[in-house]
Image: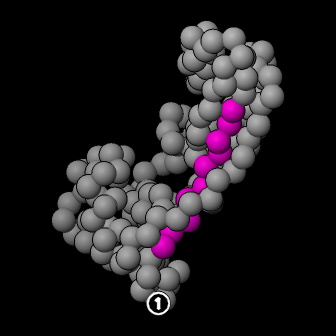
Amino acid sequence: MYSIVIKKLYIELAAKEMIRVLKPGGRISTSVWCIPDKNFWVTAMGSTINRIMQIPPQPPDAPGMFRCAESGMIEDLFKNLGLKNTSEVEVCGELDCGTAEIYWNMMTDIAAPFVAALSNADEETIIKIKSEVTEILNQKFPDGKVVIDGNSFVISGEK
């Protein structure tokens, strides 16, 4: 319970500050990731790392990229803080990696949580994770063209 209150407090404080500095009549827009099921570009690797390294799942209220993934969460916050003409639109995108190898290299170069997790793994474990991630991608993209969906919400409102 404590962490849920803290999570919402920090998010609310950030939103209040953004709204405070907004001019009257000004518009604000932000974007958050949708649920993990709509972001295979993250879950393909993340779920494999978690399973193989036996990393326990994070509580839903823990800090992370999906902490605001619930549809309506940020729009409701904006409304509760007095914004008008609020909206939430789901935006679908694609990450064109080309190949499973390029995907692996990108994720192990730029995805900080994955880099951190793999830094605690021995070489054999990393090889196993890479093999399984590659297999998952090859099953999903049998033609070898790895183009992965990623969805987010764009939320806006007017002061």
Figure coloring? one colour
Circle 1 sits in a helix, a strand or a loop, which is it? loop
Position of 25 relative to 112 (above/below): above
- Residue designated by label 1: 143
Please report the residue visible at 39 percent of the width from the left and 60 percent of the height from the top. 49
Type of amino acid at the residue the image marks with label 1: Asp
Res. 8 visible in picture: no
Instruction: Where is residue 102? Give x, y as percent.
Output: 31, 71
In magenta segment, residue 152: yes
Question: What secondary structure do most residues of the magenta stretch adopt?
Answer: strand
Instruction: Where is residue 13? Give x, y as percent.
Output: 59, 14
Decide if residue 15 is on the left or right side of residue 98: right
In the rendered image, which quarter is residue 86 located in? top right
In the displayed image of the protein, which residue is found farthest to the front? Answer: 25
In the rendered image, which quarter is residue 53 located in? bottom left
Instruction: Where is residue 125? Give x, y as percent.
Output: 27, 66
Position of 88 relative to 133 (above/below): above
The quarter of the picture where the N terminus appears is top right
What segment carries the magenta color? 147-156
Decide if residue 140 is on the left or right side of residue 145: right
- What is the crowding at mark 1: few (fewer than 14 residues within 10 Å), some, or many (at least 20)? few
Q: Nearer the viewer, residue 27 or 130?
A: 27
